Amino acid sequence: GKLSGGMKQKLGLVCALIHTPRVLLLDEPTNGVDPVSRREFWAMLYALVGQGVTVVNSTAYLDEAERCHRVALLHQGRLLFCDSPARLKSRLQDAVVSIVSAEARRVRDQLAGAEGVSSTVLVGDAVHLFVDDAERRIPEFSARLSGGQIPFDEIVRVTPTIEDLFVEAVRKDATHAAA
């Protein structure tokens, strides 16, 4: 009862491995675990996979899902996609532009309805914009923010993440359902 969250999760993994299973089912194994313990936990999982153990992991941390060989994205009990992380990320049709700003909400509000923007998502101190043409839109966004006196540190095209794909798929699904 006095173990940290990370130690409890590691102990749970060790207990699950006592019988040397060929398949290991994990339900959010790193939930509530500190970053150092999370890395150690993933190192153990990689070692198990290297030994031929099949690891099936459920997680809400989509950055962790990118570490897996195959990812199934579910929403409201429906399978949206199932493929390798690289193939999943290549499915996103829109380009993703990231704008880092201390005033990310103002950036989002300023650009949410801009031409070429299909949607926006706050990501920490940045805004991810899903756009039709990043190279064309970046100068437009820069001018619009400067004109609105909204400071920003960086505006660049970024490689989409699995989280970007998931958020966009859920948004499109909700849009279709509303129509």
Image (cartoon, grey):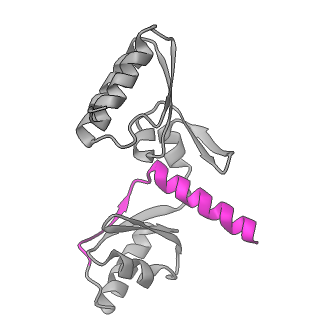
Q: Is residue 132 within the magenta segment?
A: no
- Residue 158 at x, y = what percent? 37, 58
Residue appearing at x 56%, y 60% in the figure: 168
Report the span colored magenta: 152-179
Residue appearing at x 37%, y 86% in the figure: 144
Q: Is residue 167 within the magenta segment?
A: yes
Compared with 69, 155 (above or below) is below
- 167 left or right, relative to 153: right
Characterize the magenta stretch by its predominant secondary structure: helix
- 70 left or right, relative to 38: right
User: Is 20 in front, or is 42?
Assistant: 20
Residue appearing at x 46%, y 37% in the figure: 28
- Residue 85 at x, y = what percent? 48, 39
Residue appearing at x 44%, y 62% in the figure: 96
- 125 left or right, relative to 127: left
Q: Quadrant of the N terminus?
A: top left
